[in-house]
Amino acid sequence: MLPIAIHSVSKAFVSPTGERRSVLEDISLDVAPGEFVCIVGPSGSGKSTLLNLVAGLDAASSGSIAVGGKVVTRPGPERTFMFQEATLFPWLTVLENVRFPLELLGVPKAEIAERAVDMLRLVHLSRFQTARPHELSGGMRQRVALARALVVRPEVLLMDEPFAALDAQTRESMHIEVQRLWMEFKPTVLFVTHNVREAVELGDRVAIFETLPGKLKDVFTVDLPRPRDPNDRDVNILAGRINRALKDEIEKVMALERDPDKSGSGLPPRRAGGHI
């Protein structure tokens, strides 16, 4: 598995009118090989923007990002991105969706078939190989997306609020699946979420982002045995500490929503999370 080294990274966007808006400012974060790091913060703190930079989907305005000692300049097969929506191909079956990235990588056909079927078995979807995405529940579609992300055996897995749209019961089921599969394959994971308890349940560390612009405020180590129960006393105690650390940042965003002209941020009067 590969380490991620994020050093002094800043990112700004320029509007069509030429206005410069800083989204990330001087972010430095090292992620060890096989480590599971969650990022939490209010809307507008640049969490998803950072994932895009690590994925190579966008370039930093300054600073550097390296994966496995190599500077990121473009997407690469060692990094896999899992989005909030399953983004499955509706015209393909479940099995064909999972096979697709292996075919793109030129994996031999016999190996493709074996790996795709094995991965569907691991996410408990063997009986749905011939189903189309529209025939599945939201949780099942996300399990297909997880299988597709892991079937290429990525060394880095980037996850952008992958369970935000799921109901509470299905989300907890996905947490169990993710913990089990991560413990088996041990990719290096960067996981963005608004749900602090989710971050504590899944992560080795939880990084808190400030907002306007996004900065790294604090990092909490989650020294709790796995697999973790969201109702566990220690999980909830640590989640409470992190929520208290986030309180000022959330209040800052709420104040901007109420009166953007008085935020002192230099941002134009618009939603705090715009373009992020």
Image: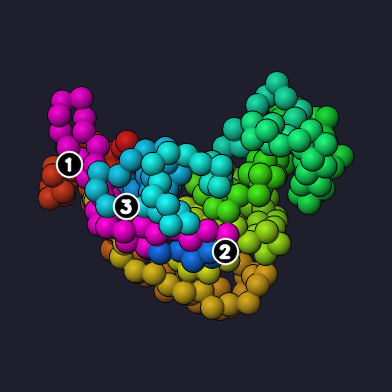
The answer to whether residue 159 of the structure is visible from this angle is no
> With respect to residue 180, does 14 lie above or below?
above
Helix, strand or loop under label 1: loop
Magenta highlight on residue 79: no
The mark nearer the N terminus, 3 or 1, is 3
Q: Which residue is mark 3?
A: 64
Q: Residue 178 at x, y = what percent?
A: 65, 56
Amino acid carrying label 2: it is Gly
Q: How many marks?
A: 3
Helix, strand or loop under label 3: strand
Q: Which range of residues does the magenta coloring cover?
A: 1-29
Could you tell whether 23 is left or right of 117 in the image?
A: left
Q: Main secondary structure of the magenta part?
A: strand
Q: Residue 80 at x, y = what percent?
A: 56, 44
Could you tell whether 73 is left or right of 163 in the image?
A: left
Could you tell whether 240 is left or right of 162 in the image?
A: left
Can you tell which of label 3 and label 1 is closer to the viewer? 3
Q: How was the colour assigned to the protein in this rendering?
A: rainbow
Q: Which mark is residue 34?
A: 2
Q: CA distance from mark 2 to mark 1?
A: 38 Å
Answer few, some or many: residues within 10 Å of disc 2's Cα (few below 14, many 20 plus, some between 14 and 19): many
Residues 65 and 37: in front is 65
The mark nearer the N terminus, 3 or 2, is 2
